[in-house]
Amino acid sequence: MSATNGMAGTLTRGKRIVLIVLGVVLAILGLEGAGFVITGWSSDLDGGAHQFHHVMRGVSTVPSLLAALVLIIRPSWALGAAKKLAANGIAYPIAAIVSLTVWPPAIIYPIIALVVVGVVYWAYRGNFPWNKHDFRLSFSRPLLALTVVVAVPLIVYGLNEASLQRSTEALHGDLGHWAGSLAGALTIVILMLFASMRMPGWRVPAWSAGFMLFMLGVASVLMPNQASSVGEGWGTLAIISSVAFLGVAELEPRLFGRVAPQPAGS
């Protein structure tokens, strides 16, 4: 990984403007959803039965705002922003298939991911690390190990949520909440995997995964009896795991000086 986190080279003015416009559009689209990370705690829909799901809807959207801001302010981190949105584009269709249900995010997120990945590819084509003749994918072993450890309980949790979505339960099922929980769990795992790749922009998926895992833990500890909460015990472990992952992500490149393959200047 690279302590600088950025891609080498500069963008033309036209490409810079396109990235800014895309970032602004993404920010506008995500503002309402991100607000649930604050308002969800007091949601009174169906007697407050959806508070946990609403909070986690906001939690899953906040990192998308981070990706949007990256495109606007830090274009050299654009690869990380693309990976963040690609994680959504991968996780939600899988959750829809496993849960045997279709709800709006399972259709919208893959479309957004394709657009963002396509624009970032266009902006930096020919300058990505894998375009270098001596490129070799190299994972951070500590981050990869933490990813595997965290992935096991998250996937088990997500599959259990998917089974509820396939059942006749209607209060949350009709809103796709159970499938959304599986999608959120898969998104965290994919983001952790992306962060483990020593690529420019690694901080975006790393901090996105850390934030989502941390908030899953916090919401579960504070709302242990809500639908989809993992409870106080697992919630505490989620908080500890998120702090450990972010700590390793930030400290490893500084301690060992590992540098991601950088693209040639554009």
Image (cartoon, grey):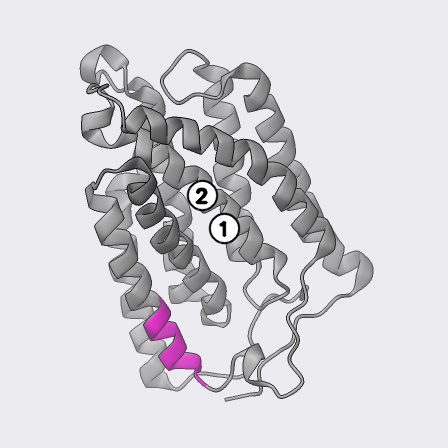
Q: Main secondary structure of the magenta part?
A: helix
Residue situated furthest right in the rendering = 256
Residue 190: mark in rendering? 1
State the separation of the CA atoms marked 2 and 1.
6 Å
**Is 81 on the left-hand or right-hand side of 31?**
right
Q: Is residue 138 left or right of residue 57?
A: right
SS assignment at label 1? helix
> Looking at this view, is 131 or 66 the one in front?
131
Q: Quadrant of the N terminus?
A: bottom right
Residue 235 is a magenta residue: no
**Residue shown at the point (31%, 84%) measured from the top left:** 14
> Would residue 59 be visible to someone looking at this image?
no
Q: Residue 13: which numbered mark, if any?
A: none
Which sits in the foreground, 32 or 174? 174
Q: Which residues are magenta?
A: 117-125
> Disc 2 residue type?
Leu
Q: Horizontal and vertical percent for residue 221?
A: 51, 18
Residue 182 versus residue 222 in the image, above or below: below
Task: State yes or no: discs 2 and 1 in contact (Cβ < 8 Å).
Answer: yes
Q: Position of residue 61 (x, y in %)?
A: 35, 44
Pick whichever, 168 or 2, lies toward us. 168
- Residue drawn at (43%, 21%), measured in percent from left and top? 229
Q: Residue at x 32, y 24 (%)?
A: 164
Return the x and y of residue 262 as percentages of the image width and height: 62, 78
Q: What's the residue type where badge 1 is placed?
A: Ile
Q: Which residue is mark 2?
A: 186
In the shown orientation, is residue 216 left or right of residue 152?
left
**Circle 2: element type:** helix
